[in-house]
Image (spheres, rainbow, N blue to C red):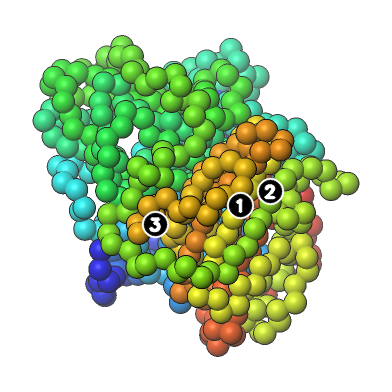
Amino acid sequence: CGPIPDTGATRTYNFHVSKETVAPDGVVKNGLVVNGQFPGPLIEANWGDWIEVIVTNDMSDEGTSLHWHGLLQKDTPWFDGVPSVSQCPIAPGDTLVYKFRADVFGSSWYHSHYSAQYAGGALGPIVIHGPKTQDYDVDLGPVMVSDWYHDDYFTLVNRTMNGIISFSNNILINGKMNYPCQNTTFACTPNAGVSKFSFTSGKKHLLRIINTSAEAMIKFSIDGHTMKVVANDFVPIQPYDTNVVTVGVGQRSDVIVEATGASTDLVWMRADATGCAFTDGVSPQGVAGVYYESANEDDVPSSTSSVAASALTDCGNDPLSQTQPFCPQTALDSNPTVQNIDITFGNNGTNFVWFMNNQSFHGDYNAPVLQQANEGNLTFPAEWNVFNFASAGSVRLILKSFFTAGAHPMHLHGHNFHVLDEGFGDWDGVITNPSNPQTRDVQLLRPAQDANTPSYIVMQWTQDNPGVWPMHCHIAWHVSGGLYINVLERPDDIQKMTIDHSVADTCQKWDAWSAANVVDQIDSGL
Ligand SMILES: [Cu+2]
């Protein structure tokens, strides 16, 4: 709680994005990596620091960009890392230096926002250290949970655009899991290994659960242990205990786990995608080993899960009534600009795509919306899905999903938004916890009840951050299919901004590269 501290420190990282074969579960695939690693290197900073990341595109045949999930980018909206929105893609061989403030604290991740590159592996964790709101002894760091596909990302996007569902092949924890090789025709090494975590009996351990999936909603648990949830996304919450944590794509939960077992215990940590994801059923649950201080690390846990089967098939976040921010919030604006958006799925004549109020998103890599707005051009092609909220004090979105086969993890850039309510049918106008509503940067919009009974969430934010902010489903295949809008916030203030010259340089390089090479933009671009 309180203002961002001025540390005067800058944390600098040098990243190279490239294509390499990877085999995190033993199955060799064509992937994307950061500095040769999957997952990519950890970005670590203190709250209030500046973070500088020098990103070079070492691929020869496509652009890229990196997005810093959940960072607010106040006064630096051009470094949000979204091609066609805040920048042009970084051309092959080119470098862009992102510089932004660690203006929030907690756990997150960075990922490519160019098409579905991140589903190929171009991602890594972010930890921003801040005040402890609850006591713990040991910070075990990021616990990234993710679905994993053995096909390369472009093949998967191509299938998606043709209306073919891709089923994930495995679930990884911190980029590791075994795979039964008889199920694949790709080169495969059995027993690739699982991640291992150390517990000290009697101590409290902080785990930073981060869902970096392309599609899967994940149910996280540790056999025989209770978790105290202390933060959702970058927002500390009033703690509550649970034996299973739900994370949709992009969501994070910081949990504190007290090691109540014996010093020789070893148990499974589980990332379960059986109930709320499209998996092929071969390995829908990722595991990692949790070893107490006197356990033999060569032994394999034999513990069983105590999570109820019904909890694994409940495809939404924990009740809003249960989740309240830890820090006091300013009162909700009772007179916001209200926008209804209905989300539907269908064929646009060429592809299977998603519609937001009957319009699917398609971006122009060569003409970022932010640059247009900065130049005072506020007339946009319909397919850019720009919602101009002008200088409204706050915005309330009522999102409805008519899709029954899955939830949508809805993500807004540039803000932690309030979640006023969720439900089915029409919102009755009643806000859950009106004096302290749930606040985060991704909220699950549950599957519709049936074709005539949509699910809804109501979100609201204060327009205190001029910029062009993506609001989209974080399922990679859905945003590729256009489930996306641009929130244009305070264009008058955007016009007054001086955008860092490196952003224009990046566009010049991209314009030159894209004029001489084929850019195979088969999806929305994001
Ligand atoms: Cu979606």
Please state the horizontal and vertical placement of residue 304, each as a whole percent of the image. Answer: 33, 14
Residue 243, by quadrant, is: top left
Which secondary structure lies at badge 2? strand
The three-letter code of the residue at mark 1 reads Leu
**How far from the left and from the top, in percent, is residue 217?**
51, 35
The local secondary structure at tag 1 comes to strand
State the residue position of label 2. 343
Q: Earlier in the sequence, mark 3 or mark 1?
A: 1
Residue found 54% across the figure and 62% down from its top: 396
In the rendered structure, the answer to whether residue 156 lies left or right of residue 34 reads: right
Instruction: Residue 201 in the image: state x and y as whole percent.
Output: 13, 28
Is mark 3 in CB contact (under 8 Å) with mark 2? no
Q: State the mark number for residue 434.
A: 3
Q: Which mark is residue 399?
A: 1
**Rendered residue at 74%/43% (across/down):** 345
Give the side of residue 515 with respect to residue 252, left or right.
Answer: right
Image position of 283 with respect to 6: above or below: above
**Mark 2 Cα shell of 10 Å, populated few (<14), some (14-19), many (≥20):** many
Estimate how packed mark 1 is, as few (under 14), some (14 to 19) or many (20 or more) residues with alpha carbons within 10 Å. many
Distance between mark 3 and mark 1 Cα atoms: 19 Å
Q: Quadrant of residue 225?
A: top left
Establish if 512 lies above or below 265: below
Lower sequence index among marks 3 and 2: 2
Amino acid type at image mark 3: Pro
Ligand 1 closer than 8 Å to the CB at disc 2?
Answer: yes
